[in-house]
Amino acid sequence: MWQKGLLDFAWSPPPGWQGRAAAASHACHLPQEQCPHVVLLKVESIHKQDDDKFFTTGQKELYLEACKLMGVVPVSYFIRNMEESYVNLNHHGLGPRGTKAIAIALVSNPAITKLELEDNCIMEEGVLSLVEMLQENYYLQEMNISNNHLGLEGARIISDFFERNSSSIWSLELSGNDFKEDSAALLCQALSTNYRIKKLDLSHNQFSDVGGEHLGQMLAINVGLTSLDLSWNNFHTRGAVALCNGLRLDLSMNGFGNEVALALGEVLRLNSCLVYLDIGGNDIGNEGASKISKGLESNESLRVLKLFLNPINMDGAILLILAIKRNPKSRMEELDISNVLVSEQFMKTLDGVYAIHPQLDVVFKAVQGLSPKKTIFLLTNPMKLIQSYADQHKITIVDFFKSLNPTGTMKMSVDEFQKVMIEQNKVPLNQYQVREVIKKLDEKTGMVNFSFLNTMKP
């Protein structure tokens, strides 16, 4: 084990190293013996030498030496958790130099797979150190560098990183980094050919319709992204429509209004890719719900639609569920209208929808106008009723469910399970209670699995 200072070990530089070191030193305006980029290059070269020349040093010693070089105070939390898979350094005031010290230590760290660096004012200098580190570290998979004032230059550095397609990072959070339309153009050009990033958070930036068009064009050809968070930006009709080429979109809190809802309804009618759409908090009322309903009548791909915190009442909610009912090919699994109070008549209508689409779960606020007795009957925990029956008959709750399955196995399709639960008379349940049972047992594959009950409390 090498015991000397970081820059004092017997080290044989590879061909071309001096040129790279000189360039790195010139870039950060520091002598080579003080330049963190040179330290990165040395660490890199160590790991590329033959086994008989391989040097190792403790992670702690490497980090402390990097802090000394950068003139920053070491973060004790980082030292204590360097061997953990998850490290949270949010709000630590690292700055660019503190971030460089962290990056140097991470070059050869095999333990950390998720790193949080939100709100550390790392600036473009800090993000440059991080992307250099990511070219050597193939263990880190998720990183959060939100709220770090990266701006256009930071977007340029990240875009260059995306274009290389050479990192193990698949989840990146870039929320609140002052990205505007020009940043969107850079990021989208790079993401068009990137296949490694699966989950990307660009919320709380300053994109508007031009940025939305760049993002929409990128989504049409990107083969990697499965989740994109664009909430709290400034998209309007043009940008919102352009964006709906993706698979999962969070467009909440963008202030669309009913005009955009009309365009989204048309997108849903024609789109065959979108599976998740969050448009909560966008000032969409019953008029907008009516337009979206037109799209739901023919859409065959959407599974989750979130409309929470929009001024929709029960009239708009009925339009939405009836649209799903009229679409025999609907794949909707969740409709979130959880700020809407519904009536007993709405529940009866919903039962008819559930009969056709048993996979659907409609989330609403509460049922208004019910007598206390009906409320108790409607909302009594169905799992407790089933457990009580099982206890009385000295069987397990799993045995109860298996007895309803003609094959006697631990799994059934959702459709078959709903039918037998309604028809069985051992434990009378209403449609709402049956839906609650399905939610507890649903594998999200169209099947319910009774084995979940072995680890579940009623």
Image (spheres, grey):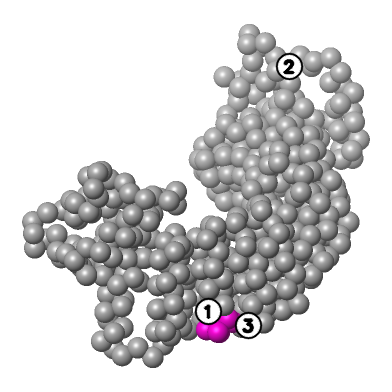
Of 106 and 241, the residue lying toward us: 241
Amino acid type shown at disc 2? Trp
427 displayed left or right of 47: left
Residue at the spot 71% in from the left edge and 47% down from the top edge:
98
Residue 217: give its label: none
The question of residue 128 being in magenta is answered with no
Q: Secondary structure at mark 1?
A: helix
User: What is the crowding at mark 3: few (fewer than 14 residues within 10 Å), some, or many (at least 20)?
Assistant: many
- Between label 2 and label 3, give the one nearer the viewer: 3
Image location (x, y in percent) of residue 306 = 58, 68
The boundaries of the magenta stretch are: 312-316
Query: What distance separates the C-alpha of mark 1 from that of mark 3?
Result: 10 Å
Amino acid type shown at disc 3? Asn
Mark 2 = which residue? 11
Residue at the spot 31% in from the left edge and 46% down from the top edge:
411
Amino acid type shown at disc 1? Ile
- Between label 2 and label 1, give the one nearer the viewer: 1
Mark 1 = which residue? 318
Residue 286: give its label: 3
Q: Secondary structure at mark 3?
A: helix
The answer to which of marks 2 and 1 sits earlier in the sequence is 2
